[in-house]
Image (spheres, rainbow, N blue to C red):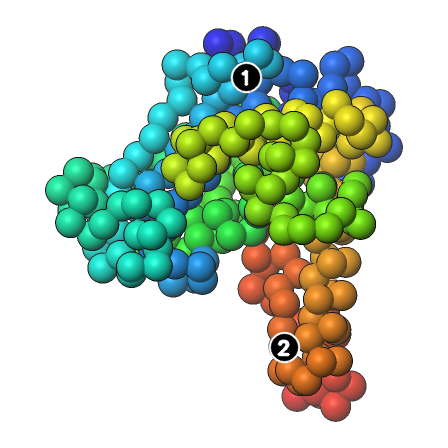
Amino acid sequence: MTAAAVPVGRRARVGSAMAAPAASPWFAGVLVGFDLETTGTDPSSARVVTAAISYVAPSGVLLPRSREWIVDPGVEIPDGARAVHGISTEQARRAGGPALTGLWEILDELEAVCAAGLPLVVFNAPYDLTLMDAEAARYGLPGLRRRRAFEDALVVDPLVIDRFVDPGRDGPRTLQATAEAYGVAADAPHTATGDALTACLVARAIGRRYPLVGTADPTTLHAAQQEWYRCRAVHVQASRRAHGDAQAVVDKGWPVYDGHPVWFVARETLGA
């Protein structure tokens, strides 16, 4: 696989969002899926257990460069997490590599994907990508936001896009439920490789179904997802506060949480 064989990624800044569309749609070439199975649901504290970076051909076949890691997270894997992905603390310790080595390799491969201009498909991107940055900080590694290639990455988040193009659909918005909505057979649910592959297939199906999304140039699509995510986060935060949780705060950052979730500043604090 060479760089010439895949569509060009998000090379321009958001300010050039009106650039002419690429000759072929972003979903027509190789897509790269990324998924984590972890120890918990809080990306600031959860640890990586397995990770997959899956290079998916237009035919839907996994390409040879695809890779999966199993990592010893260095902490106990809670029963709730084990019930989801099936990996126990003992299994991770026995079969997993050192966390530092695995995280280093995963971050370097993600950087290579971005540098090659390949669409990086991550279902619910702020969870996985924020978690990777937290793990990088934990081990003294340069995180995604400290890597130049990531600044120009085209991240495709099927969850964010699906919520925008089909807001009225009833039911859950899990990866498996979303795959079913687009006629995609979920491959090996709750395994990193299976979910990374399924996310790519869902992204391709969305691109085909909705020309607004499928024909968007990479810069426009990336910026649109940032705004769609921010708008929903603002709404969710306001709804939680209106229903009694006066201190509710929802981070507005996408594809990585920005750590500044408050979208307004009280007037009395401006001089503090």
Disc 1 crowd, CA 10 A, few/some/many (<14, 14-19, 20+): some
Left or right of residue 117: residue 84: left
Q: Which residue is drawn at 73% across and 50% down?
A: 170
Left or right of residue 96: residue 215: right
Determine if residue 123 is in view. Answer: no
Disc nearer the start of the sequence (2/1):
1
Amino acid at circle 2: Ala
Left or right of residue 45: residue 24: right
Q: Could you say which is closer to the camera, residue 143 or residue 204?
A: 204
Q: Residue at x 68, y 26 (%)?
A: 205
Residues at marks 2 and 1, CA–CA distance in whole angstroms: 41 Å
Q: What element carries label 1?
A: loop
Quarter holding residue 165 = top right
Quarter holding residue 156 = top right
On residue 81, which mark appears?
none
Q: Residue at x 59, y 59 (%)?
A: 258
Taking 207 as reference, is 241 above or below it? below
Residue 36: percent from left, percent from top? 41, 43
Residue 169: percent from left, percent from top? 76, 47
On residue 248, which mark appears?
2
Residue 173: percent from left, percent from top? 63, 48
Q: Which residue is drawn at 35% across and 59% down?
A: 80
Q: Could you say which is closer to the camera, residue 242 or residue 234?
A: 242
Q: Is mark 2 on a helix, strand or loop?
A: loop
- Quarter of the image containing the C terminus? bottom right
Disc 2 crowd, CA 10 A, few/some/many (<14, 14-19, 20+): some
On residue 60, which mark appears?
1
Determine if residue 250 is in view. Answer: yes
